[in-house]
Structure formats: C-alpha cells, structure tokens
Image: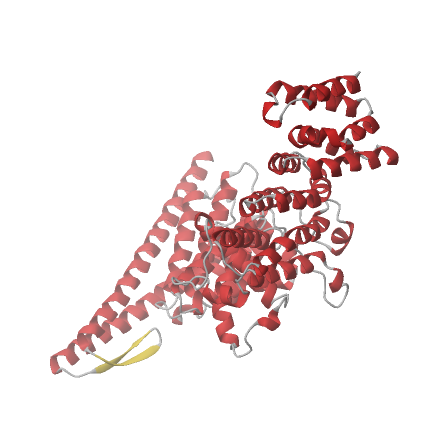
Amino acid sequence: MAVEELQSIIKRCQILEEQDFKEEDFGLFQLAGQKCIEEGHTDKLLEIIQNEKNKVIIKNMGWNLVGPVVRCLLCKDKEDSKRKVYFLIFDLLVKLCNPKELLLGLLELIEEPSGKQISQSILLLLQPLQTVIQKLHNKAYSIGLALSTLWNQLSLLPVPYSKEQIQMDDYGLCQCCKALIEFTKPFVEEVIDNKENSLENEKLKDELLKFCFKSLKCPLLTAQFLEQSEEGGNDPFRYFASEIIGFLSAIGHPFPKMIFNHGRKKRTWNYLEFEEEEHKQLADSMASLAYLVFVQGIHIDQLPMVLSPLYLLQFNMGHIEELLENSLLRIEDNSLLYQYLEIKSFLTVPQGLVKVMTLCPIETLRKKSLAMLQLYINKLDSQGKYTLFRCLLNTSNHSGVEAFIIQNIKNQIDMSLKRTRNNKWFTGPQLISLLDLVLFLPEGAETDLLQNSDRIMASLNLLRYLVIKDNENDNQTGLWTELGNIANNFLKPLHIGLNMSKAHYEAEIKNSQEAQKSKDLCSITVGGEEIPNMPPEMQLKVLHSALFTFDLIESVLARVEELIEIKTKSTSEENIGIK
C-alpha cells in the first residue's frame, strides 16, 4: 500500500515543473516514503530513487527521507542485507538532494542523540556532511554551523582519564576526535590553496580558528595523555592536539605568535566574532595550548630556540593559574578526600601558591594565588583541610599567610559548632592539637611582635571567638580544658613581649625626637632590621605606627582576658547555684 501511494505521488509530480511542486506534495511524499521504510519496502524505495525520471522530485523532496533512513542505520538489530540497502539509499539521497536542505537535516540528526549515541551519529554522518558542504557556495557559514554543532555534541561526552578508558573509548570520543580531523582537513587545505584572500576565505579562516580554540578547551584542556614511551603514537588526544595546532599554523596563526601576544593590548593576530567569549574562553584555550606545547612537547620544535627559560616562565605563569582554576572548579566543595594529600603534588601545589603569594613582585599574581589557595582549601574534605592547615602553619614562615590559615580554621570551627553533629577535626582533642600551632609565640616573650603582628591578631581573634561561642560547661572545642596551657604559652608571654616592645619603641621615639632637634640623620631598628639614614620626621611616623600596632594587640588581648574572666566567673556561680 505504501509503495502504491508513493508511486501515485511521484506519477503526479513527474508531469509538473520544479517550481510547481506544492507543499501538500512534499508532505504526502514524506509520509509515503516513511511508510515504505517502516514496512520494509526498501528495495522498491531504492528503485524509485535510482529512476532517472524521478531525479528532480528526489532533489526537492528526498531530503525528508534522510532522517528515517539514518535512524534505521543507527539501529544495531538490522540485518546486514537490509543495512546494505539503507546505505545505498542514504548515499543516493546525499548525492541527489538539495544540499541546503540536506545540511540542515543532517545537523538536526547530529543534535538529536544523547549519551553513547552521540558518537555513533557523528561517525555515521561526518562524511556525508563533508560531501554536502563541498557542494555549497557559502561555505564559511556552513562550515561554521557544522563545526559548532559537532563541538557542542562532543562537549557533552565524558573525557576518558585513564589508559584503559582511552583504549575502551566507551563513549566514542577518541574515534570522533580522529574523524573530526579528517572532516576538517579539506577545508583547511582550501584556505591554504586560496591565494586571493577573499572575504569568504577570511570568514572561513575565522570559523576554523574558532573551532581550534574550542577544541583546545574541550576536550584537550582536561584530556589525559599516554606516556610517549609507551603507545604515544597511538594516543588519540596527542594526535588530535597535534593536528589542531597544525591547523592554527596552516590558517595563518602559528602558535608561538599566539602564545607571546596573548594578553597584550596590541595583538598581531585577530579573531572575528570571538570577542564575546574572549575573557574565559580564550584564557582557557591559551592555557591548554601552553600546556600542550611546554608540558607535552607537541610542536615544541617550532619555538624559537633563543627564548630564555625566564622569558617562557613569564608567559606561562598566567596559563598555570587558568589550568589550576579550571581543574578545581570542576570539583564540588568538601569532596576532595584527605588521602589525596598523600600524593606529593597535592601538597606542593598549595605550598607553591604560598611562595607566589609571598615572593612574587606582581600584585595581580599574588592576589590570584591567594584566591586559588582559598579555592583549593574549599574543595578538601574536613580531614584534608585539617592536614593542609597543619602543613602550611609549619612551613609558610610568613605572618600574613599564617593569619589567612587561622581565619580559615576559625571558619571551620564556626561551621562545626553550627551543625547538630560536631566535626571531630575542628572540635575536641584534634582541634586542641591544631590550636597548639596557633596559640603560641615562636620565640616566647622575645618574639618580634611587629613582624608577627598579622598572625598574633588572627590568633587573638580566634581565641576571642572561642571564648564567646563555647561555654565552659559545654566545652565542645576543648578550649576550657587547655586554658591553663594557652595562658602560659601565649597570653603571658604576649604580655611580657608587649611591655618589652613598647618600652623599646618609646625609647626609639625619644631618641628620634632628640635627633630631630639636632637635625641629624639617624638609624632605627624596626622588625629586627636596622634602617639607616632615615629623616627624623619619617622615622617618627614609623615608630608611632609600630606603637599603634602594639596598642591594638594589647586592646584585643585585654578584651580576651576580660571575656575569659566573665565566662569562668559565670560558670563558677552557676555550679555553686546547682549545689
């Protein structure tokens, strides 16, 4: 019945001119053709499509049959003989149908699937899609649309992260990457062969450039590479990366020029319609490119050999932060298990960030490193945070960094106390062990209080918080049990140190005032270092600033001791009342 219906429609349309086909004819042809496929009359359908008399009809209406045929080809349960006929029908439709309509139809079919069917669909349709685009005049737009659709679908596939996963390629991403290179090559070659640099050719370059940038971000930014010594030649991602970087050079954007001009206000290379994504998209892509070249060594032989290691470090520093941030943002907060800190790099990375925070002369990088360290802390589970805090308190040797860590400890205690079930790492004995590293003076009363002022203020604020939030009868933090040790190791030495420091600086102020009267230049000692030949008026400002810091510390210390006294007195009275 379906075959008769289709033949009837075709017979009526054979006597019409192409421009006289009605919308009703298109609909009836599609329904009858679909019925033929559903009822298994594929041989008859193939005969109709092969008939030279139906060439104009198939050109205008046949693209409607591509969808049903492709869906049959994607079904694994079809007999081999049937599949052979479906392939013949599909090839004829690609050859005969209107390429504009066919392009949109194929892209819709690529967009339809999800999961593992994404790669199956792409692998089936890439070659026909390439054939169709080659027939079109407005090639740049068509290629841009196709590459964007393909990339959007591929970006939904999980990137394999182990050698076994890469070899199994369950979701077909590795196969698709290889096939995508073969799909793109003819269009890259077309750009190379076109010596006229027409507007259409420039547009084609831009579409290819956008695709390369997107590919550098996904999947290459998160892709795992096999060791070059073992099966490096069979690494699908290394092949994909090498070809993508090769495409960049082929279309006029050699990667050394791109790397060394990224971030500059005046660039020697341009990219159209990419501005809206520049800040994040381009930063991630350039970080990926730097990693592929400098870490994986892909095309590194194309770099000028005269570049010094320091010069290369300067250009790569920004990419390093992008790679770390991109990796961390993919992880949920509190989900990075403490066991990972047993891996050397998981401790050296935060320690490296501390070095950048404290030693780097560029302020933006120092601030970025601080933000990265906080992001890293946020991702660790409770025991991981606890372990990292201990490590950094022992190794940072910087008052500002230690103050930052102490503030993080306070935040963790606060979250723990607000929960119905306490976090054992930030309450009780474990917390006391951590507080031993916080509530003490490194050199007792002789500690340089000015140099350690950030750490001391953070420690006092933490202690004040604990006294306010934790009652002596509850003693959730263990503070009240250890109060005697805290007083001996921290509060009393701090009192003595403050008295000594204030006396020293008051004497220095007196000396400076006398020098000011005599108009002599003099030297003073600040933070354990002698600062020579300072004008007396400047010297007085420095000394008064130091005294102000000591007064501030003393004020907070007094408040902490007052709160301890109030709390202990209140608890004592409650206990007497109970008795």
Query: Is 550 left or right of 423, judged from the image as shown?
Result: left
Q: Nearer the viewer, residue 199 or 341?
A: 199
Vertical order, 121 against 279 (above or below): above
Would residue 333 be visible to someone looking at this image? no
Q: Residue at x 23, y 71 (%)?
A: 506
Q: Residue at x 78, y 50 (%)?
A: 168
Q: Nearer the viewer, residue 400 or 15?
A: 15
Query: Is 399 left or right of 218, judged from the image as shown?
Result: left
Query: Is 554 left or right of 373, judged from the image as shown?
Result: left
Q: Nearer the viewer, residue 377 or 514?
A: 377
Q: Quadrant of residue 301?
A: bottom right
Q: Please provide percent x and percent y for residue 401.
A: 45, 62
Q: Quadrant of residue 453?
A: bottom left
Would residue 44 be visible to someone looking at this image? yes
Q: Please provide percent x and percent y for residue 154.
A: 64, 45
Q: Residue at x 70, y 53 (%)?
A: 178
Q: Please provide percent x and percent y for residue 538.
A: 21, 73
Q: Nearer the viewer, residue 181 or 37?
A: 37
User: Residue most toward the top?
Assistant: 1
Query: Is 18 left or right of 444, judged from the image as shown?
Result: right
